[in-house]
Image: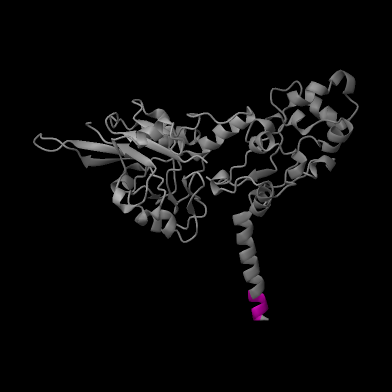
Amino acid sequence: MAKWGMTIDLDRCTACQGCVTACQLENNLPPTGPKEAHAGRNYTWMEMIPFEGEGERPKPIERLLPRPCLHCDNPPCVKVCPVGATFKNEEGIVGQIFTRCIGCRYCTTACPYTARYFNWVTPEWPEPMEDHLNPDVSVRSKGVVEKCTLCHHRLQNARDQARAEDRPMRPGEYTPACVEACPTSAMQFGDLSDPESDVSKLAHSRRAYKLLEDLGTEPKVIYLREGE
Amino acid sequence: MRSVLMTVFAVLIVGGFVAVVYGIVVRAEPVTQPIAFNHAIHLDDAGLECLACHTRAATDVSAGIPGKAVCLDCHDIDEEGGSHTEKDKLFAFEDTDGDIPWGRVAVTKPDVFFSHRRHVTSGKLDCLECHPDQAELDAPPPTAQLVMAMDDCIECHQQRGVSEDCLACHR
């Protein structure tokens, strides 16, 4: 059984936010507009988190860290959901069944990476965009929590194609939209349980580290530190 | 008397909630189709396979409703014109720009993703396993013949040992 994971190389990342836009288009994330943004209610499943980098200039260099849901192997969000709307599946993807969610927001509080978002308003798109939503992904209603699904629909499509051609799924056939859009190949995706996969080798390299590792959440999105 | 009424009321509320939550295919408004298509004649007498007309069932999420080009592949106005009312309705569409305006009788809920391709091509299921009554239909039903609940899906998935992952159907 595959264990899907991702590495993000902070040396290669230019903070272009191509991954953010690709994710929004792939997963039908509506633009929230200035009013909601001002209230801090923007939501992007892939978010650029600002942090202070190292440096000896007059002040430390401001950096941006691309942060999807980290799909923890020990996910705190799953433990607190009172209705079983969120769970970790056999392949390690932390899923969310949007129509089962009651919007209690325990999970948004429990997630140490702030990777979960509550829908404060009914989603609306500007006129030309509403006709071009991705039919493989639902439009979530107001009042539920949503999050990155590692583009699970792409896994299903890749698997269907492989079965139709009566062959095993090839590495690289299932790639989330953010990884596909990255112009510098800073993001790598694949099966962490395969020691020969590129992502597995990177995840076990000297530069690899996990966000807030001491919490024991065991994230499957692993960062490669910069400057080495 | 009051407790009986309360019980009936509670059953209606709970029953309605369960039907809304667990039904994955809901009936659309009753539809009168432009042609009284006879499935029984096509399957039994003509010996056609379902996929002969519903070609997208093997390759796409939706099985689709065949357009006039599929019908006119077999039916010829010179040989059959004027012989049968329903066939004449088909031939009336032959020289028009538009296609036959078939009405949709079943829709899945917006959060449920059912793929015909996954069941027909990957699962190698016969269409009649899920649509058993379709072969006996001599006229189009005004509403969906098949109304499935999540229990039906789960039961079949358990019997066949295939994925019961929530993400397989809900997104």
**Which residue is at the far top?**
B78
- Count all numbered tags in the image, as a single digit: 0
State the residue in front, A132 or A103: A103
Residue at 46% over, 61% down? A82
Say whether residue A62 is visible: yes
Say whether residue A22 is visible: no
The quadrant in which the N terminus of chain B is found is: bottom right
Horizontal and vertical percent position of residue B19: 64, 57
State the residue in front, A192 or B44: A192
Up the image or down, A196 lies above or below A141; here it is: above
Query: Is B40 on the left or on the right of B14, as rendered?
Result: right
**Which residue is at the far left?**
A58
Horizontal and vertical percent position of residue A134: 51, 35
**Which residue is at the far front?**
A195
> The magenta stretch spans which residues?
B2-6
Horizontal and vertical percent position of residue A126: 42, 36
Residue at 82% over, 23% down? B74
State the residue in front, B161 or B112: B161
Q: Is residue A203 magenta?
A: no
Up the image or down, A189 lies above or below B106; here it is: above
**Which residue is at the far right?**
B83
Query: Is B61 on the left or on the right of A48, as rendered?
Result: right
Rendered image coloring scheme:
one colour
Query: Is B54 on the left or on the right of A114, as rendered?
Result: right
Instruction: Name the dominant secondary structure of the magenta segment.
Output: helix
Residue at 43% over, 31% down? A197
Horizontal and vertical percent position of residue B85: 87, 31
